[in-house]
Amino acid sequence: MAADLVIVANRLPVDRVTRPDGTIEWRPSPGGLVTAIEPVMRANDGTWIGWPGGTEQDLEPFEADGLHLVPMSMTPEEIEGHYEGFSNGTLWPLYHDLVAKPEFHREWWDSYVGVNRRFAEKASEVAAKGATVWVHDYQLQLVPQMLRELRPDLRIGFYLHIPFPPAELFQQLPWRRQILEGLLGADLLGFQLPGGSANFVRLVRQRVGHKTHRDLVYLPDGRTVRAAAFPISIDAAGFEELAQTPAVAERATAIREALGNPRKIFLGIDRLDYTKGIYARLRAFSELIADGHLDVEDAVFVQVAVPSREQVEQYRILRDDIDRLVGRINGDLGRIGRPVISYLHSSYPREEMAALYRAADVMVVTPYRDGMNLVAKEYVACRFENDGALVLSEFAGAADELRQAWLINPYDINGMKTALLEAYEADDKTLTRRMKAMRKTISQHDVAAWAASFMLELGDSGDGTHAAPARAAKPS
Ligand code: GDG
């Protein structure tokens, strides 16, 4: 059946689980993007196109939890060239301020083009006449243009979840023009922050030569493309509800006890990624212990590092570096039953995440560059008693909204130490004032509002020749 709304993303919103009897089951994966888009999908009977992970070929469309899903298969060569290569070895570091050195390989680019073409072809097959197609993220930047060529009747939106870099960095890319033109196939381009959309418009003017005015790009064929900021958010009410359940409360108490009931718990939760600044943050904390500003009887740092992109060389190196650092810190500064850092290289169910957020007194989020950072917002949503402190990098998109956090420069270890100590010592009145303000922001700008505003704007954009736009789901 042709769909009036099609979501195109690198991954499908489900995980493949093999039951004990060997049969396969698909379970919805609880990531932020699914939560955000699910209501819009349901309101429009939408279809989601994406890769389910793995290398299985000839996959058939299926339904999971009432969602229509169209799996895209990937060959081992495509995983290496498109996913691990061009997406995560070239674009990811380039778009994150060159925190690591991007590699440019022509065969990776060819693979990127090929996979983008297959996704575009699939979208053109499943989209109904005049349908809305919403393409997501840096792995699929060529899809908007390829899809428009196949299906000029469609209304096409694109959202970038990671930062869009300044021209000075972007123009290193040998295929910069193709990427800009690929994106310009959309009617509406969404970025996390106004800085990202401004970078894009400036590059289009300089590199492609199109006329622009503020957030609009005027194409020679008469089309207008809008590039604007739509800061993503979380299901704030859902997280708060989960944090308030007796099971999560009990688990939070058990976590504190297992850690020896220290006065304060510091917490970091990140994908194990070099953009997240895990190494410098652990160093800063360990120096506070070594300097005698904090004592291991009073404070512990829990770091959850979720395994990520383990086939990519730089991620393996990072893992070894952090393993070594944690070992050294605990070896030098820990006591029996009192490690300085409680390090967990694993992923956890949502309930455990909520229990950790509840147990933590100081949440530490210190990326060198981050599109938004949902962990920071999730922590705030879980602090329904208006307590707890957030230490947040200025270079996370979330810092634009969460102004009452202890904002830090992640490159400045001494500055980070000062902020960690201030957050540790802050009195209840200060904590309440700051947390209340941040909670207000999060509850007013939740993920349903984000998706609804993008869909509404997409409905209004384009040249007006489309059929009725897809319905936005009601904001909660
Ligand atoms: C990209 C951009 C942007 C993490 N560990 C577990 C788990 N998580 C969940 C968190 C959070 C999400 O994953 C991570 O989101 P972040 O925003 O922190 O970071 P990225 O993965 O880098 O996401 C980022 C985001 O896209 C959205 O646009 O904010 O800037 O880089 O929701 O809770 N969830 C579960 N178990 C875990 O172990 N269940």
Image (spheres, rainbow, N blue to C red):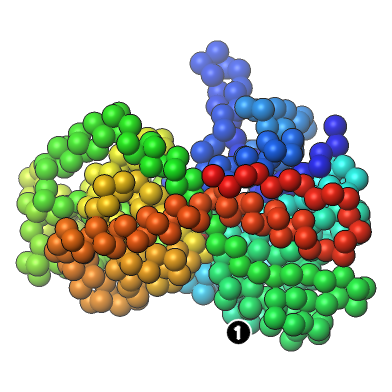
Q: Quadrant of residue 137?
A: bottom right
Kind of element beneath mark 1: helix
Tell me how many marks there are: 1
- Would residue 54 be found to the left or right of residue 222 on screen? left
Task: Please provide percent x and percent y for residue 237.
Answer: 44, 43
The residue type indicated by label 1 comes to: Glu
- Would residue 245 be found to the left or right of residue 219 on screen? left
Q: What residue is drawn where x is 10% and y is 62%?
A: 294
Q: Is residue 227 visible?
A: yes
Q: Quadrant of residue 347?
A: top left
Q: What residue is drawn where x is 24% and y is 53%?
A: 387
Task: Please provide percent x and percent y for residue 181.
Answer: 79, 71
Q: Is residue 44 above or below residue 217?
A: above
CB of residue at label 1: within 8 Å of ligand 1? no
Task: Please provide percent x and percent y for residue 16.
Answer: 58, 30
Q: What residue is drawn where x is 62% and y is 40%?
A: 38
Instruction: State the quadrant of the N terminus.
Output: top right
Instruction: State the quadrant of the C terminus.
Output: top right
- Would residue 317 be found to the left or right of residue 217 on screen? left
Q: What residue is drawn where x is 26% and y is 34%?
A: 249
Which residue corresponds to mark 1? 168
Q: Is residue 125 above or below residue 458?
A: above
